[in-house]
Amino acid sequence: MQTYGIVLFYSTREAMKAEALLKEKAQLNVRIIPTPETIHASCGFSLKYQLADEAQLVELLHQADIKREGIYTATRYGLKTQYQLREEL
């Protein structure tokens, strides 16, 4: 089983801006991924991150005024992944 977080954004520009900020400023292990089909989002890209980094990630996005559409927890069991909404804005 693998568990990780996914942040959804309103635009591709915001997703790319968030990735650059989090990698360069905080050196967090994040990467842009296609938004999973089972999650509705305005943007086709999301940011995958380690759950242990969530508090720092949310604070940095807030400080940089990067708008997010929602935060999900993804739990992967073999080939199947389940998504649970944690925060919707």
Image (spheres, rainbow, N blue to C red):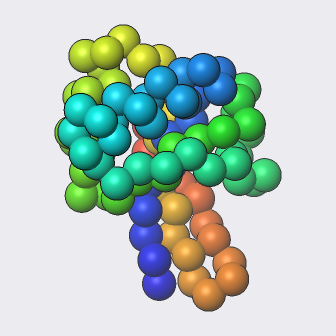
Of residues 87 and 77, the one nearer the viewer is 77
Question: Residue drawn at (74%, 37%), measured in percent from left and top?
Answer: 44
Q: In which quarter of the image is residue 63?
A: top left
Residue 47 in percent (x, y) is at 51, 44
Question: Residue drawn at (62%, 50%), measured in percent from left and top?
Answer: 33
Residue 60 in percent (x, y) is at 26, 27
Q: Which residue lies furthest to the right in this view?
A: 37
Q: Quadrant of residue 8?
A: top right
| Side (left or right) of 45 relative to 85 | right
Question: Residue drawn at (53%, 55%), measured in percent from left and top?
Answer: 84
| Side (left or right) of 2 relative to 51 | right
Of residues 70 and 61, the one nearer the viewer is 61
Q: Residue furthest front?
A: 24
Question: Residue drawn at (72%, 26%), measured in percent from left and top?
Answer: 42
Residue 35 in percent (x, y) is at 68, 46
Residue 10 visible, this angle: no
Q: Is residue 22 above or below residue 77?
A: above
| Side (left or right) of 49 relative to 72 | left
Q: Say how many tags the image has.
A: 0
Residue 78 in percent (x, y) is at 62, 87
| Side (left or right) of 73 relative to 51 | right
Residue 31 visible, this angle: yes
Q: In this view, does 30 lie above or below 82?
A: above
